[in-house]
Image (tube, rainbow, N blue to C red):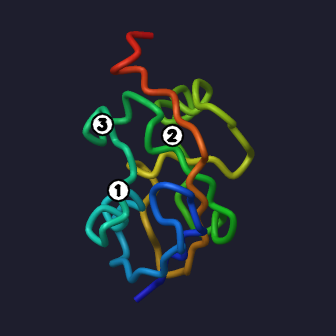
Amino acid sequence: MPQIIFLPHEEICPEGAVIQAEPGTTICDAALANGIEIEHACEKSCACTTCHVYVREGLESLEESDEGEDDMLDKAWGLEPDSRLSCQAKVTERDLVVEIPKYTINMVSENH
């Protein structure tokens, strides 16, 4: 079973974390199931950017993002080439190294 290695995040997982994830599970669902509280204001419907993450290793093993995810990512704080919405990126057979950004833009609560 592949692992997701979460790099330390000051608030969400200060020590970092290494979790197991079933292939086909989204990064967000795997994180939440293991006590890593990634924000997901739109309830994982690809309608906000609060679950934005950087896939530092293993990005090429994920299915490419679709147009809807790309449109949302264009609005994410700190967009980088390895950015994904964790509610859309599904784990495959490869391990991943994931970094949670320091900030998010919560379009739901900020009425953007």
> Closer to the camera: disc 3 or disc 1?
1
Give the alpha-carbon distance from disc 3 to disc 1, as whole Å: 17 Å
Dot 1: within a 10 Å radius of its alpha carbon, few (fewer than 14), some, or many (20 or more) residues? some
Q: Dot 3, crowdedness within 10 Å: few (<14), some or many (≥20)?
A: few
Q: Give above or below for 30 relative to 50.
A: below
- Is 23 in front, or is 27? 27
Q: Nearer the viewer, mark 2 or mark 3?
A: 3
- Tell me, for residue 37, which label it has, or none: 1
Where is residue 87 drawn, in percent x and y?
Answer: 38, 49
Judging by the rendered image, the residue that carries numbered circle 3 is 45
Residue annotated with mark 2: 66
Q: Are marks 2 and 3 in contact (CB under 8 Å)?
A: no
Which residue does the image show at 40% across and 89% down from the upper left?
1
Q: Is residue 23 above or below residue 90?
A: below
Question: Of residues 98 and 72, which is closer to you in this image?
Answer: 98
Tag 2, which secondary structure?
loop
Q: Secondary structure at mark 3?
A: loop
Q: Which amino acid lies under the numbered mark 2 shown in the image of this protein?
A: Asp
Q: Give the percent coordinates (x, y) of residue 110.
A: 41, 15
Q: Residues within 10 Å of mark 2 (few under 14, many from 20)?
A: few
Residue 51 position within the rendered picture, expressed as x and y whole percent measured from the top left: 44, 44
Give the numbered dot on residue 3: none
Quarter location, residue 35: bottom left
Mark 1–mark 2 distance (CA, rounded to whole Å): 25 Å
- The residue depicted at 30 percent of the width and 42 percent of the height is 44
Q: Is residue 34 left or right of residue 99?
A: left
Residue in view at x 33 percent, y 78 percent: 22
Q: If the image is split into quadrants, where does the C terminus sit?
A: top left
Give the amino acid at mark 1: Glu
- What type is the residue that disc 3 sits on? Ser
Q: Measuring from the top left, give residue 88's x and y in whole percent.
A: 41, 49
